[in-house]
Amino acid sequence: MKKKENQEEHQINIELPEDIAEGVYANLAMIAHSNSEFVLDFIRLMPGIPKAKVKARVILTPEHAQRLLHALEDNIRKYEETFGEIRQSGEPVPFPMNFGGPIGEA
C-alpha cells in the first residue's frame, strides 16, 4: 500500500490541449545555445520556396537538453529495433543560418 501511495505522489497530470495535440510539421531544426539555455527552432522548409518559417521554438536548460538527447536516443533505438535502421537521404540542407546567437548543428 505504501508503494502505491508513493507512486501517486510522484505522478504528474499532463494536459494536452486540442490545438497543441494536432502538432506542427517541421522538417528542419536549428539549435543555438548559450551558457544557460538551448534554443530549438523547428522550421518548415518547402521545396522551391526560398523563405522558411519557424513553426515552434522550445527553450531548454542544458540539463533538460541532455535529458531530451537521451530520450531521443532511447526512442530511436526502440524505433529501429521495430522498424529497421533509419536511413539518411543524403540530400544537403541549404543552411545553416545564423539567427543572432551561437550556432549548434542539428
Image: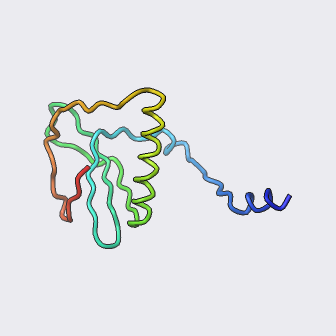
Q: Is residue 27 above or below residue 101?
A: above
Report the colour scheme: rainbow
Looking at the picture, tell me which residue is in the foreground, 35 or 19: 35
Write the residue at 73% across / 58% down.
7
Query: Whole-percent x and y of residue 75?
Result: 46, 42
Query: Whole-percent x and y of residue 65?
Result: 40, 60
Write the residue at 83% across / 62% down.
2
Q: Is residue 88 left or right of residue 96?
A: right
Write the residue at 36% across / 50% down.
56
Using the rendered view, name the quadrant where residue 8 is placed: bottom right
Looking at the picture, tell me which residue is in the foreground, 2 or 65: 2
Residue at the limit of the structure toward the bottom, as seen here = 35
In the rendered image, the quadrant that contains the N terminus is bottom right
Q: Is residue 94 left or right of residue 34?
A: left
Query: Whole-percent x and y of residue 27?
Result: 29, 38
Using the rendered view, name the quadrant where residue 18 is placed: top right
Write the residue at 21% across / 43% down.
52
Looking at the picture, tell me which residue is in the foreground, 69 or 101: 69
Using the rendered view, name the quadrant where residue 40 is placed: bottom left
Task: Report the number of discs.
Answer: 0
Q: Is residue 42 above or below residue 86?
A: below
